[in-house]
Amino acid sequence: MGAQEVSEFLSHLAVKEKVAASTQNQALSSILFLYNHVLKQKLEPFGDLTWAKKPETLPVILSKEEIKALLSYLNGKDWIMVAIMYGCGLRVDECTRLRVKDIDFARFQVVVHRGKGEKDRPVPLPQVLIQPLQEHLIKVKKLHDADLKNGLGAVDLPFALDRKYTGLSREFNWQYVFPSQDISPNKISGNLQRHHTSERTIQRAFAKALKKAGIVKHAHCHTLRHSFATHLIEDGRDVRTVQELLGHSDVNTTMIYTHVSVKNVRSPLDTLWSEESGAKAPWDRLPAELEEQFKEVVASKYRGNWEAAISRFVKAHEKR
């Protein structure tokens, strides 16, 4: 099997199998690994190859009312984690890896260390989170003190700081804000310690709350970050500020949230029967008991085309 057969196979995936672009790229990477590292053969250029197109999708956004409903079905640590992801625009891993020292109550800010691209950035701390966070950290302190009494209490540190500063890993300010409930061995050193809460734990809690709130959107924890950015733009914040808060290197990445927001855009359909024009909407001419039923029929069968619906109704009435 040579370059021609590989090209035909990859094109088959895109044209016949209708696979996603990521699936086709994964197949190509697997084939290249097979030839380069296993068969020790070099493939010739592929020539004509049909690539699967990556769709340009818009992020899912939760409204402020949906955020409120979601939070109403959470409590304790889960409530704080979801609230801080939305209120600060954090990624899931940035939230779980927060340390006590990263929260600055005096300056009302949270410092995200080693975010995507190994960049640090400050984000505002919502004032409504100050008291819940302080009460939560009291519990974390008690848990840490208990670990110290049991000969534990160490936490993993970045950049091998534990070798440079002996005992630093047992300091409270370096502990995770959201520690795990279980003690587990460090994968590298093998020492028993308390890691941070698993991302899957908060993702499961989020999914359960989403279902209980009756929200049918395909949302996940990262949707909170999308909602944070969109709501800031809708509230009048400039794109550059939002870019800094999200930690984007390119402003074009942030610009997608300007395409998501249609808050101040009014559909022309709503202007056809506006109060200013004095014209009554078609449903206003119907008996009250038929209003809702007629709306549903027009929306489902006629896609909102009132003229077509009324014309069909008149013709049917004339036949009688």
Image: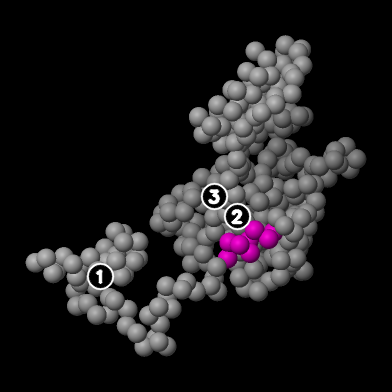
Q: Amino acid at mark 2?
A: Met
Give residue 122's position: percent from left, percent from top. 77, 61
Query: Is residue 314 magenta-colored?
Result: no
Which residue is the site of mark 2? 81
Give residue 70's position: percent from left, percent from top. 48, 59
Seen from the viewer's position, the closer of residues 63 and 122 is 63
Q: Residue at x 27, y 80 (%)?
A: 284
Position of the N terminus, as image quadrant, is top right
Q: Where are the magenta residues, as a range?
A: 254-261
Kindly identify which numbered label has been placed on residue 96: none
Which of the two discs, 1 and 2, labels the residue nearer the N terminus? 2
Q: Amino acid at mark 3?
A: His
The local secondary structure at tag 1 comes to helix
The nearer-to-camera label among 1 and 2 is 1
Q: Cα distance, mark 3 to mark 1?
A: 42 Å
Seen from the viewer's position, the closer of residues 16 and 119 is 16
Q: Cα distance, mark 1 to mark 2?
A: 52 Å
Above/below status of 237 relative to 132: below
For the question of whether residue 256 can be seen, the reply is yes
Which residue is the site of mark 1? 310
Seen from the viewer's position, the closer of residues 156 and 17 is 17
Above/below status of 35 relative to 188: above
How packed is label 2: few (under 14 Cα within 10 Å), some, or many (20 or more)? many
The local secondary structure at tag 3 comes to loop
Give residue 220's position: percent from left, percent from top. 54, 50
Above/below status of 1 relative to 179: above
The nearer-to-camera label among 2 and 3 is 3
Seen from the viewer's position, the closer of residues 129 and 226 is 226
Kindly identify which numbered label has been placed on residue 220: 3
